[in-house]
Amino acid sequence: MIKIENLTFAYGKKKPNVIEDLSLTLHPGAIYGLLGKNGTGKSTLFYLLSGLLFPDGGKVMMNDINVTKRQLGTLQDIYILPEEFDAPKISFEKYVRLHAPLYPRFDHEQLGRCMAEFELPMDVDLKSLSMGQKKKAMLCFALATGTRLLLLDEPTNGLDIPSKAVFRRVVTSCMNDERIIIISTHQVRDVEYLLDRVILLKNSQLHYEGATADITERLSFAVVPTSDVPSTVIYQEPNLAGTSVVYPNPGGEETVLNLELFFNALSVQPDLVERYLKA
Amino acid sequence: MNSNSLTRIKYLLLQDLSMNRKRYISLFVGLFLGTLMLIYLVHPKYLLHDGSERFYVAVYNSMPVFIVCATLVFISELFANFSTKQKRVHQLMLPATKGEKFAARFLLCCVGFPIVFVIAIVLADVARWILSPLLFENTLPLICHKLIPDMLLKTTFYWEGETLDHFLFCSFMTWIATFYAMGSALFRRRALLKTKLCLMGGFILLVLFLENFDIPGKSAVDDNVFDVMRIVAACILLVLSVVQFCLTRRLYNRIQVISKQTWYDRI
C-alpha cells in the first residue's frame, strides 16, 4: 500500500508549488490513470512516489517505509519507466542479464511472453531499434520486474496502433493483487479500458480520485445528434458526429467511459460533476 | 557486507562497464597516448651515448605529476554516472544500497582505473620499444618492468625527505583527493574542469589574503616553530579532508533526479 500524506513540492524556494498538500492512498490490485493538463505535476508526482525527489513537505510511505530513504527493499519493489530514457548500446539479452538479478521477483517467462506479443526477439540490439521498439522492449522489462509499484510515464507514446492493443493486453496479464500500476498519459483513449481508478491533478492539487466503475455507474457518456441533447446534460462539446455529452445515469445502466470527455467535464463543470459522482 | 551485497556490487560493476564501455575505452586510449607522448618527449636526447639509465630516471621523475593528474581525473569520475537526468533515474532506481552503489563506483574509479593506467604505461613502453627502430637509428630498452614496481614501492613506502614533510605531503594529497571527490559530487558534469577552476580561484584568494600578512620563511624561524607550523598545517588539511568527505557523503545521499537550483538546496 502507498500512503501519500500532505505532499508538497516546488522546484526552488522562490518557485510556486508544483504539488500542494496532496494526500492519497493507493491500494494494491489496481491500475491507476494519472491525468492532468501540462505542468500540473504528473511527472513530478512520479518522481516523488519513487523517491527520486525529496518533498518539501509531507511524505510518501510504501509499506510504512519512507521512499526517500531509498532502502534496498523499497527499490526492489519500485520500477519507473520515464517518458524519455537512454536505452543502453548493448543487446537486450545482455541488458536483462545485467539487471534482472537485482529484482528478486523478476519473471523471465513473463518477459519472454511480453516480447513475443510485441514481436521482438530477445537478442535484439537496443541501439539499432527505433524509439517505439525501444519503448516496447523496456516496457516488457518493466512488466517482468515483478515490482509492487510500477510507474509508466506516457507508455504508449511512440507505439504504433496495433502495439497499443498489445500494450493493454500485456499490462492486464501482468496485473495481480499485490501490484499497483500507475499510468500517466495524455493518450487517454489508449488506456481508458485498462484503468480501475483515475487520479486527476489540477492547479497542483488533487482534483479527483475514484474508481472508473463509480464514474460509469453515475454518469453516462454518449455522442448524440445536436438536436437530441438530453435536458439533464452536465457537459457537452461539439463533435464531428454531433455533440458529445455527459449526463447523469440515475438507473446505473452500463455505460462506456469516455475519459477525455470526463476530464473536460470535470475541468469545466467541477461542482456539477462532483455532485453527481457523490450522489 | 554479505554474499548478496557482493553479488549486487558485481552486477553494478558489470552494468557500468557494459553500458559505458566506449567512454572507458576512450579513457584507456587517452592514458596510453598520454604516456607514450610523455615517454617520447623524454626519449630522444638519451638515445645517444647509451643514456638508458638517465632515460629511466628522467621518465621516473616525470611520472609523479602525470600520476597525480591521472588520479584526479579518476576521482572526478566518481559521480559521472549521475551527470544527466536519465542517468540519475537509472542509477538512483537500481535496487542496491547507497553503500553498494558507491562501493562499485569506488572500485571502478579508485582501483580499476589505476590498474588500467598501469596497463597503459606498460603498453606505451612496449609500443615505444617496437616503434623506435622505425623512427630512430637505435632504441632504448624496455623500462616498464622496473618502472612499475619502483613507482608502487618507492613512492608509497620509501621517503627520502623528513617525516614531517611526508606527513604534510600525505595530508595535502588526502585533502586534494577529497576536494576533487566533493567536486565530482557537486558538479557531476565536467566536474574535473569546474573543480580545478574552484581550486585555482581558492588559491588566488588565499594568496591575496596572505599578502596582508608577513609570513616568515623557513630560514627566519626556529626549527621547532617550523615543525609546529608543518604539524598544524597537516592537521588542518586532515580536518578539512574529513569535512569534505562528510560533505561528499551528504551530497551523494541527497542526489535527486532534478537538481535544485542552488548548491545550498543540494546540501
Image (tube, coloured by chain):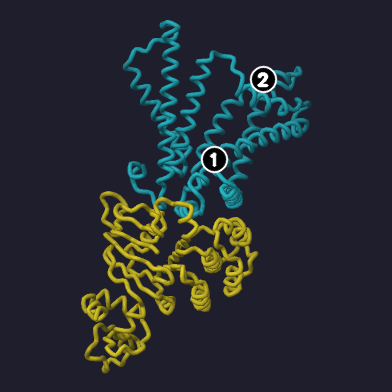
Chain colours: A yellow, B cyan
Q: Which chain is disc 1 placed on?
A: B
Query: What quarter of the picture does the N terminus of chain A occupy?
Result: bottom left
Q: Amino acid at mark 1?
A: Phe
Count of numbered badges drawn on the protein: 2
- Residue A182, x across and y down, in percent: 42, 68
Is residue A84 visible in this depiction of the protein? no
Mark linked to residue B106: 1
- Residue B77, x across and y down, in percent: 52, 41
| Mark positioned earlier in the residue sequence (1 or 2) | 2
Query: What quarter of the picture does the C terminus of chain A occupy?
Result: bottom left
Decide which of B128, A228 is in the foreground and name it: A228
Element under label 2? helix
Picture layout, residue A227 above or below residue A13: below
Decide which of A98, B70 is in the foreground and name it: A98
Side of A263 where A89 appears, left or right: right
- Residue B15, x across and y down, in percent: 58, 52
According to the picture, the residue beneath numbered tag 2 turns out to be: B57
- Residue A214, x across and y down, in percent: 33, 80
Q: Amino acid at mark 2?
A: Val
